[in-house]
Image: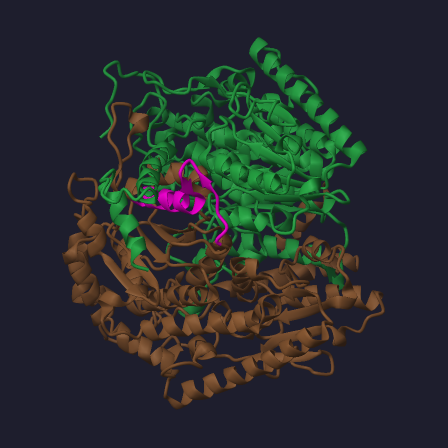
Chain colours: A brown, B green
């Protein structure tokens, strides 16, 4: 269906790399984890890499040295080290060659490049300079709030990248919530979302943060107007309560209407914006500016670590390669991310957007339709909860689901209870380790219902403790894993054309409703939309 | 790997039905939704069924009359109507023939069979009688709490079926929360889950509900002990604050230790227990007994509706057949459930367990390894939020994801705002309809990045309003959809052997930790577990 440009570029890409051919051969007979003596303590120690206080343990994947060498060769052929350097230096990587596209740098790393060994290119330095100015503006703003004590509640209005990341990170650090500070989120067009978020709130003490990169997001503007009505009906002035985060010059950038306007730039994608003011305003309000600063420091540390030219200590790259092995060569359609940490209970929802919106693509960077599988269905819930939910299917279903576990040696709050000789934290880790091993080895049995096939691959990202610094490193780990996969598949991980069709059709149907509201019954604006509207009439 | 019994049963099953062969042929050329003139207003009206104030609109699936007729024939060959009658009458359907298995009735429908035309079999009547006695006990208990005002907070401790269903239903009705009533949930072994749930709670006014069918669930018992410590340290008596829900005679059935003990029975699976006391105690405390009663009435109404022998008005059956068409014949590996209702934002997590733990199976009811795909990866998040997250991949990724939408004509709280001529509710529905149509028809374009392949199937369960009654009907709809699929695939949807291996291995690793705690460093209890434990030492 897609048209190919006449001047079709004849460069090497994923389908023509030597390593791709090697890996296809290796995939016919992947390492068998169920064979007695194959999964050993030595293997667990052997397939382990470390960076920024995290370890990646991947001995429970279906790989051996031959596979890993071919994967590292794939990374080299795709020049991922070079591309990562270029990305962080600000080269225009958000592009489809030969077609109109966003044509932008991809510089979310600049929003935290304030620490050791900053990028030296002019564009990256300028971006980090602008980002730092916003961080300092935020610090002053929060310092003033802290002094004045004007606001106790923050209502954050955003959706997608302006909601999922900030919200997941809020839950991840919720134990650090400052006294007399509360946060509520509004994202959905569903009016019940706004109506329930506004229940029982003391508007006089409420700060509202409206976040939309372009300042034109339908959900966010509708909800802003809805929330503003609460303030005007209470005879309060919205301009004394509302702040915004958006592009400079957007409809939301207006100091006559807003108490403060924070900026982002077109070199940050929404889903990569948690370390910008999109996450910064709310996280600093809730936990204090210093927590946000430590979070940025952690993200920056992993940004530097993924520039390591040694692929064997590059956690994001190894995870990216394992993902490509499972998805493109072993043909597993999904990836489940299972954090054994209740604080990360909404974290997978953020990584789901980050990954699926970045790599759920059908054309490569030359505009050719890809002939292999790109980004997987990414899903998951926290453990141990999920063991009591969908793990039945993971162990014994007819479709193999690779898993990415996340775990920590220590709990966040360090409050624990010894029961039957072990702490809850030890029991938590025991369950995590048990899943990795059981999924890999399986189990034979006389009773077919007690047979576990095994060879269900997983790996574990293991950290010491989920501090703000570790959370920053974790976010950067996933961001760069996804970027590395895009580099190798040669797709543009930084646009999202796939959301446009729905917006266009939704506006047509909103037109049908508007016509109905004005009693123009026979508009025939959009017959399919009208047919669905009429289905509502018969309730 | 699985052994087959010598006396292999030679009955007709999924692979040998005539309809299966027909459907395989039809699947080679499924209905094309992208061809101009194929998706019409007439088609939308034609593929529509109604029951209990819900409509199922499925014109945007890849089906035509020939496919639907073959699917209905499949249902008939599998005798689903007969099996559903037997299930609700209490026949032992939780069984694997020829092997040790749970050997139980499947009677969650009895927990709400108190209304019109109750089941008449002796076993179903006895079950409903016992269930009703617990409901009345609950009513007295809640009436007394309401009179005395002793408790303002409820802490619910449970996991899996004792957490996901109740929690999802709590959020679904949260706008009805009674004044001075709060609910907190604890599920995870992660000690941070308990520690954060207990922050700032007034223990004197706290009721704790401990829910575990067997009374032996590791997470729940650990968390119960942990929470008890808070009470004893505050010099409060746990037996004046703790109630339980479990099997009669379980370790939790002890009135000397607990204020009250509510019962469930071995004919209810954990994931099917929301309408029993597992959901009942918390939901009645939060919203009032009458809300719980209306919820039961709604579930019962759909229980009766799925007994309709006319398959064309049986919503659960049609959805089950569409699911089998997409999963087993068109080979789509997953199903996304997308409720366009913020109140249902955790509902998919419940249906995820319900479906994947029920139908994520690799053997049939004779113990034979199945040769076709059973239960899919089930996942999803609420719309419109998910449009700004993973819908990029749904529209343009390389793996097709069928969708099950849920939507309502009216909002719950009926508070709304007109912006640009339409309400938020109208905009919400417009987005829902737009996704169904856009995914089906796709879009051509000169720019390959703006091409949408289309033919991405979906259907919509549309209700009038998400009341307690509708929520009950919705739950029953999904429960029976899953049961019908199990009947057709001939698998046992009611056991969960796949969770056992993890439990066994976890206990071995807990043993490694216990030995370490007692400084028995060289126990060699489980070398693989020890290897993972040692990885923790190097942080």
Classify residue B264 as left or right of residue A19.
right
Identify the image quadrant of residue A491.
bottom left
Q: Please, is residue B127 above or below residue A440 in the view?
A: above
Q: How many marks?
A: 0
Residue at 53% across, 16% down:
B90
Q: Please, is residue B270 above or below residue A461 in the view?
A: above
Q: Residue furthest top?
A: B122
**What percent of the width, then of the height, locates residue A274?**
51, 69
Closest to the observer, B381 or B265:
B265
Q: Is residue A59 located in the magenta-colored stretch of the structure?
A: no
Q: Please, is residue B61 above or below residue B474 in the view?
A: below
Question: Is residue A400 among the parts visible in the rendering?
Answer: no
**What is the magenta range?**
A414-436
Closest to the observer, A131 or B395:
A131
**What percent of the width, then of the height, locates residue B294?**
72, 31
**What percent of the width, then of the height, locates residue A518?**
79, 60
Closest to the observer, B7 or A424:
A424
Residue at 19% across, 44% down:
A32
**What percent of the width, then of the height, locates residue A429?**
38, 47
Q: Residue furthest bottom?
A: A122
Q: Is residue A427 located in the magenta-colored stretch of the structure?
A: yes
Closest to the observer, B41 or A210:
A210
Residue at 21% across, 71% down:
A76
Q: Please, is residue A323 above or below residue B526 in the view?
A: below
| Quarter the N terminus of chain A occupies | bottom left
């Amino acid at each position: 269906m897609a048209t190919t440009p006449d001047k079709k570029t004849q460069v090497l890409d994923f389908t023509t790399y030597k390593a791709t051919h090697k890996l296809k051969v290796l995939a016919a007979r992947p390492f068998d984890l169920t064979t007695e003596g194959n999964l050993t303590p030595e293997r667990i120690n052997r397939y382990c890499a470390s960076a920024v206080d995290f370890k990646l343990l991947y001995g429970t994947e279906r790989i051996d040295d031959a596979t890993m060498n071919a994967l590292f060769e794939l990374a080299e052929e795709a020049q991922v080290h070079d591309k990562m350097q270029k990305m962080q230096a600000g080269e225009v990587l958000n592009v489809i060659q030969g077609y109109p596209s966003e044509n932008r740098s991809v510089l979310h790393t600049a929003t935290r490049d304030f620490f050791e060994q900053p990028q030296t290119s002019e564009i990256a330095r300028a971006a980090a300079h602008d980002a730092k100015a916003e961080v300092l503006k935020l610090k002053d703003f929060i310092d003033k709030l802290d002094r004045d004590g004007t606001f106790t509640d923050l209502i954050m209005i955003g959706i997608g990248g302006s909601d999922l990341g900030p919200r997941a990170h809020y839950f991840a650090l919720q134990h650090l919530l400052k006294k007399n500070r509360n946060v509520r989120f509004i994202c959905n067009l569903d009016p019940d979302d706004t109506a329930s978020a506004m229940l029982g709130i003391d508007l006089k003490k409420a700060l509202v943060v409206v976040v939309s990169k372009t300042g034109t997001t339908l959900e966010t503007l509708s909800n802003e107007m809805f929330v503003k009505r609460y303030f005007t009906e209470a005879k309060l002035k919205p301009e004394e309560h509302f702040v915004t985060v958006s592009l400079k010059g957007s409809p939301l950038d207006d100091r006559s209407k807003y108490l403060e306007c924070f900026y982002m730039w077109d070199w940050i994608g929404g889903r990569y914006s948690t370390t910008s003011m999109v996450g910064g305003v709310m996280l600093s309000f809730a936990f204090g500016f210093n927590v946000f600063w430590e979070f940025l420091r952690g993200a920056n540390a992993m940004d530097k670590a993924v520039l390591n030219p040694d692929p064997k200590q590059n956690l994001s790259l190894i995870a990216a390669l394992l993902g490509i092995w499972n998805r493109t060569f072993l043909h597993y359609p999904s990836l489940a991310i299972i954090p054994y940490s209740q604080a990360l209970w909404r974290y997978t929802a953020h990584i789901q957007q980050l990954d699926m919106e970045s790599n759920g693509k059908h054309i490569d960077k030359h505009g050719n339709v890809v002939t292999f599988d790109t980004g997987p269905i990414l899903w998951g819930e926290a453990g141990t909860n999920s063991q009591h939910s969908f793990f039945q299917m993971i162990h014994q279903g007819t479709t193999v689901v690779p898993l990415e576990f996340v775990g920590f040696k220590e709990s966040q709050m360090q409050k624990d209870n010894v029961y039957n000789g072990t702490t809850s934290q030890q029991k938590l880790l025991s369950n995590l380790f048990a899943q990795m091993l059981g999924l890999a080895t399986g189990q034979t049995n006389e009773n077919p219902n007690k047979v576990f096939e095994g060879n269900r691959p997983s790996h574990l990202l293991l950290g010491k403790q989920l501090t703000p610094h570790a959370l920053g490193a974790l976010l950067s780990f996933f961001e760069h894993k996804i970027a590395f996969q895009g580099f190798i598949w040669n797709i543009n991980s930084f646009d999202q054309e796939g959301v446009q069709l729905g917006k266009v059709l939704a506006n047509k149907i909103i037109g049908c409703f508007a016509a109905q509201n004005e009693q123009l019954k026979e508009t025939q604006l959009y017959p399919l939309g009208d047919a669905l509207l009429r289905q509502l009439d018969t309730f």
